Image (cartoon, rainbow, N blue to C red):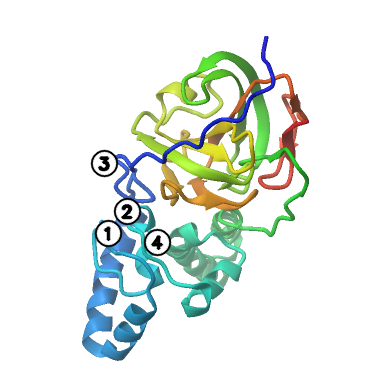
């Protein structure tokens, strides 16, 4: 029978695996376009705005070692934040306003590259083929709707674990043993449709202990085998508060969703409900918790939940 946990010794964060080459290790066409744009932008800044480059370098904190390209300003960290240890204070980040647009910053390039042509088609259709306007307009709405980032009020209170994703609970399964957790566990599976917000959030105040990226298939997230065979990112967390329970968040790709984003660094401390990444289009997210006698599951299969807002479970 599961028992109440004793206080564990703090775990040592593990180095980032070599195949975790960026915050979006699966790549993608928009990803490559944005990287190419970054190369041109850095050349332009060094050539025509050397004073800006010097000012940003003076305000930069930490080491750029490990980054695959030059880090001139915070935009250069978008895809390689996990590969280096540098950053800027919020007051020194001239692009922090992008986080207040109401859209996921990791999806702004897709929003521009996919939404821009659809907007142009909608305008042209309205001008020359009015009866065809609803089709590009509907596709434009779906693109904008998908990348939305609505504000969330994170609940407070001891022992609470909030949802790591929006969607519907499709599985609550007891596991006899999980190697990372070190004992019995409970796996909660969440299905995200294309209509859900796709940002992932931390279930509690925790520290990142280990990260793993596994390439794989792109089966429909409604199929049980997708949890095993599909491309996924595995995030091992440790609660900041005693008894420092370990838990896991898994981001799993789907039939349409083929790009997983996770910008965490080993050893990074997260607040409850803090954004940790996203999965672009329909997918699946799992939360795996230690199954102890003081664990109380607050949701049931079939319930719709909201990341950072819905209380999934609590340790009483």
Q: Which of marks 2 and 4 precedes in the sequence? A: 4
Q: Residue furthest top?
A: 1
Q: Which residue is mark 2?
A: 83
**Circle 2: element type:** helix
**Circle 4: element type:** loop
Give residue 67's mark: 1
Q: Which residue is mark 3?
A: 18
Q: Which residue is mark 4?
A: 78
Q: Which of marks 3 and 4 precedes in the sequence? A: 3
Q: Are marks 2 and 1 in contact (CB under 8 Å)?
A: yes
Q: Foreground residue, 5 or 277?
A: 5
- Residue 95: image location, x then y, percent: 48, 75
Q: Are marks 4 and 3 in contact (CB under 8 Å)?
A: no
Q: CA distance from mark 4 to mark 1?
A: 11 Å
Q: Are marks 3 and 2 in contact (CB under 8 Å)?
A: no
Q: CA distance from mark 4 to mark 3?
A: 18 Å
**Image quarter of the N terminus:** top right
- Residue 242: image location, x then y, percent: 64, 37
Q: Foreground residue, 115 or 122?
A: 115
Residue at figure coordinates x 32%, y 48% from the top left: 27
- Residue 79: image location, x then y, percent: 36, 57
Which is closer to the viewer, label 4 or label 3? 3
Which is closer to the viewer, label 4 or label 1? 1
Residue at figure coordinates x 69%, y 21% from the top left: 4
């Amino acid at each position: 029978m599961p028992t109440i946990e004793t206080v564990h010794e703090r775990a040592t964060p593990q180095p980032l695996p070599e195949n975790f080459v960026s915050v979006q290790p699966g790549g993608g066409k928009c990803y490559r376009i944005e990287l190419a744009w970054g190369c041109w932008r850095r050349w332009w800044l060094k050539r025509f705005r050397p004073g800006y480059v010097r000012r940003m370098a003076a305000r930069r904190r930490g080491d750029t070692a490990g980054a695959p390209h030059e880090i001139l300003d915070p935009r250069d960290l978008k895809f390689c934040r996990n590969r280096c240890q540098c950053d800027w204070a919020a007051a020194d980040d001239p692009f922090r306003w992008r986080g207040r647009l109401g859209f996921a910053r990791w999806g702004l390039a897709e929003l521009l590259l996919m939404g821009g042509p659809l907007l142009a088609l909608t305008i042209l259709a309205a001008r020359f083929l009015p009866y065809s306007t609803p089709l590009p307009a509907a596709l434009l709405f779906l693109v904008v709707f998908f990348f939305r980032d609505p504000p969330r009020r994170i609940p407070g209170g001891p022992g609470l674990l909030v949802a790591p994703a929006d969607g519907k609970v499709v599985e609550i399964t007891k596991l006899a043993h999980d190697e990372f957790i070190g004992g019995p566990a409970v796996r909660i599976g969440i299905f995200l449709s294309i209509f859900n917000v796709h940002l992932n959030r931390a279930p509690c105040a925790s520290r990142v202990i280990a990260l793993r990226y596994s390439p794989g298939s792109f089966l429909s997230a409604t199929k049980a085998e997708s949890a095993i065979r599909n491309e996924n990112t595995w995030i091992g967390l440790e609660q900041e508060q005693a008894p420092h329970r370990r838990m896991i968040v898994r981001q799993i790709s789907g039939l349409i969703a083929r790009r997983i984003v996770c910008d965490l660094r080993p050893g990074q401390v997260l607040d409850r409900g803090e954004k940790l990444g996203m999965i672009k289009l329909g997918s699946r997210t799992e939360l795996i918790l230690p199954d102890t006698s003081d664990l109380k599951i607050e949701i049931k299969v079939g319930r719709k939940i909201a990341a950072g807002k819905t209380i999934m479970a609590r340790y009483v």
